[in-house]
Amino acid sequence: MFRKFIAKNFPAEPVSAHCDGPCGVYDPAQARVHAEAVVSMTKKILDLDPSDGKHSTANTLSRYIAIKEQEAHSAKEDLLVLWTDYFKPQHLEKYPDLHTTFWNAAKLCSKVKVEVNLEAAQELLDSVKKIHEMFWESKGKDVPWITAS
Amino acid sequence: MDHRVLRLCSEIPPAGWLEVFLWLVGRRKRFRVVNESMLPLLSPGQEVLAARRTNPEPGEVWVLAHPQKPDLKIIKTVVGKGVDGQYEVRGLNQTCSEDSRQFGPARSDLFLGRVESLFFSPEPGPR
């Protein structure tokens, strides 16, 4: 009774068991897979010749474009989550170009979505690689950059 | 986490009158647990009494300042002692805890108090 009264009327100083939700599970690999897919779909689009006038070619081109746009959007979402949820102000001390890197990467996601631009797609993948290196270094782990394609 | 740590962390004794007396005379400090990384040992809303001590030992539960956010006090279990005066700490609910796996070992001067007893539980009785 006494303790309940104390706890209710004189709250103790909070001490965080610290669940940095959702459970602190982050990995730039998600963005890497999407960025790789953008590079791949951009190459496939450029390899197609839409001037043949075939419905099958138009259908394939349409599908490739839809996939490229979806993958670019997914890459952007994953990068924004890493940027806003994982990275903290103290990381800026070690990585002063962190904000610029993420901002440029997010801009590249938009660029590769609306254009058929292989150079920009490769630039996006390079940006994700840089983020991969910052991320794992910040966690004190040496995780090699390995691509699926 | 090894079995020794699990055994030592299995229970925090309820505060007896001596513990309450030590709190009243300022020899213990009350802390209220928020968040869930110390489940199943400590639940959100429970209050503990901590004593100012030195030399954390593996298996003990401590209140410490977050190594990267000095204004944030956290409650963790000590799981390892380094040769350079730094300690590995973990939450018991490791799927939902930010601890030394993320922020690295904690310096000894960050440790504020060893948890001695459970002062209050929102639900009847300690877990």
Image (cartoon, coloured by chain):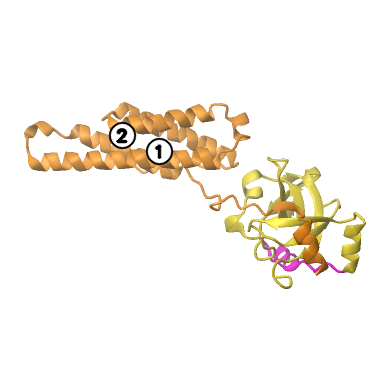
From the viewer's side, name the closer residue of B45 and A125: B45
As for residue A132 lying within the magenta part, the answer is no
**Does residue B78 appear in the picture of this structure?**
no
Secondary structure mainly formed by the magenta segment: loop
Q: Position of residue A124 (x, y in %)?
A: 39, 32
Res. A29 visible in picture = yes
Q: Which chain is orange?
A: A
* Kind of residue indicated by mark 2: Lys
Q: What residue is shown at x 90% (from left), y 55% (from top)?
A: B27
To which residue does mark 2 refer?
A113
Give amino acid for label 1. Answer: Lys
Q: Position of residue A63 (x, y in %)?
A: 21, 43
Q: Dot 1 surroundings within 10 Å: few (below 14), some, or many (20 or more)? A: many
Chain in yellow in the render: B
- Residue that label 1 marks: A76
Asked whether A148 or B57 is in front, the reply is B57
In the image, residue B4 lies in the stretch drawn in magenta: yes
Distance from Cα at disc 2 to Cα at disc 1: 10 Å
Bounds of the magenta span?
B1-16
Residues flagged by tags 2 and 1 on a common chain: yes
N-term-proximal mark, 2 vs 1: 1
- Position of B6 compared to B16: left or right? left
Is A97 rendered above or below residue A30?
above
Where is the C terminus of chain A found, in terms of image quarters? top left
- Tell me where residue B66 sits by quadrant: top right
Question: On what subunit does the disc labeled 1 rest?
Answer: A
Residue at image coords 74%, 72%: B125
